[in-house]
Image (cartoon, grey):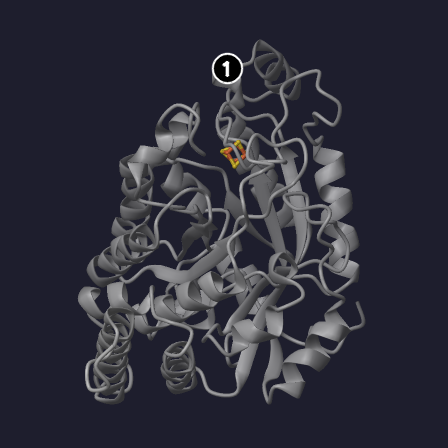
Amino acid sequence: MHPHVAEPGIVTLIAIRTSAQERASSCAAELADLQPGSPISRELALRLINCSDDDLPTLLAAARAARDNFKPGVLTYSRKVFLPLTNLCRDYCGYCTFRRDPGEPGAHTMAPADVLAVARAGEQLGCTEALFSLGDKPELLFPEMRETLRHLGYKSTLHYLEAMCELVLRETTLLPHPNPGLLSAEWITRLAAVSPSMGLMLETTNAALLASGAAHDNAPDKVPAKRLRTIEEAGKQQVPFTTGLLIGIGETSEDRVETLLAIRDLHERYGHIQEVIVQNFRAKPNIPMAHVPEPSEGEMLRAVAVARLLMPNVNIQAPPNLNAPYYEELLDAGINDWGGISPLTPDYINPEKPWPHLEQLRLRTESKGFQLRQRLPVYPEFLPAVVSKSGLLSEKLQAASDREGLAKHRETRAA
Ligand code: SF4
């Protein structure tokens, strides 16, 4: 080999290093030029979501700066009870441990007395949110659910949900937050009369996941266009809305950016997205996706950081139980909320991942220099519009909120 001619492999390596360094410095330069509160472009997001480990600290630092500009010094959570109104569901998502068919062990629809008992127990522990989670339209598939509803005196699962939201609102100090799946315009109006906010995970905009064998095979309610329509309708009605994406269900990193952009687009048009959840897939036995690899910590950190930079002025949440043991790192990626934490009910969606004890969460949050504050299911910036409506919902919200729009006198009570 001639001493002045590098080996071809070394030439390639130098070229790769040079182009990686150029990319890194161009990302760093663009991030350094960002105005506080300004969102990044689609193109930059697509580059950042795949950034190298060397570039990751720069990305995380930019995301932290954006979060600190948005809501400095405070991390919020919602102290909630989890009300799995029914775990019957007409969809069969490949990652779901919650759903059951009628007659399967664990199949259950809560009675009104159970709903009230759990809500009242939560009230005693300082909870302010009644999170209603349920399968999507089970009565369309299962005659057993039609019979259960007939016995309870309701025409559909949504009619029953509406009544239970109203019951909790009337009889307790808890505020309902329903997550019932796809909703028509009429049902958004009806549920908004008995709950200050509601939610539907967009999950992904990748319709290819509906294909045979993919995560949303046999899940008719997971058609992205239908979910976008529900979120848009909530926007037209100015309903504070929680949505988000799932990481690791077969989507690409580019899909993650497109999903975030679809959420951002709706928020730019209607201003109603109160919170974006970045949730990671966890493999569990007995699910069709039991052997699918879970997303890495690095993928989660990139997704959270890019979400923060695409939507610098939107609340970004990652659930701490799903990310243990690295949930503190999520603070470094720009979240400003831990989501719903229950001192009472197990997390029925991921029962094997217990919620971190609230006091432990507080200590670990404070050790990173943040104050942990309890919020209501509706975020403070969305509260005035809901309070301005008259009626029971407004009265209950005013009674539950402090001057900053956070939960009144709740954060110091023991879990
Ligand atoms: S729609 Fe929800 S409850 Fe039904 S299978 Fe999918 S994730 Fe599970």
Query: Eyeballing the image, is 82 above or below 356?
Result: above
- Horizontal and vertical percent for residue 43? 18, 66
Picture residue at 27% right of the left edge, 60% below the top: 264
- Horizontal and vertical percent for residue 230? 32, 41
SS for callout 1? loop
- Horizontal and vertical percent for residue 357? 76, 66
Picture residue at 75% right of the left edge, 35% below the top: 113
For the C terminus, the quadrant is bottom right
Q: Is residue 341 left or right of residue 343?
A: left
Q: Is residue 365 left or right of residue 158?
A: right
Q: Nearer the viewer, residue 121 or 303?
A: 303
* Residue sitting farthest toward the top: 143
Query: Eyeballing the image, is 186 above or below 261?
Result: above
Does residue 2 appear in the picture of this structure?
yes
Q: Nearer the viewer, residue 12 or 144?
A: 12
Q: Quadrant of residue 402?
A: bottom right
Query: Is ligand 1 within 8 Å of the beta carbon of the residue shown at mark 1?
Result: no
Q: Amino acid at mark 1?
A: Leu
Neighbor class of circle 1 (other Cα within 10 Å; few <14, some 14-19, many 20+) is some
Q: Which residue is mark 1?
A: 141
Q: Quadrant of residue 218?
A: top left
Picture residue at 43% right of the left edge, 86% below the top: 68
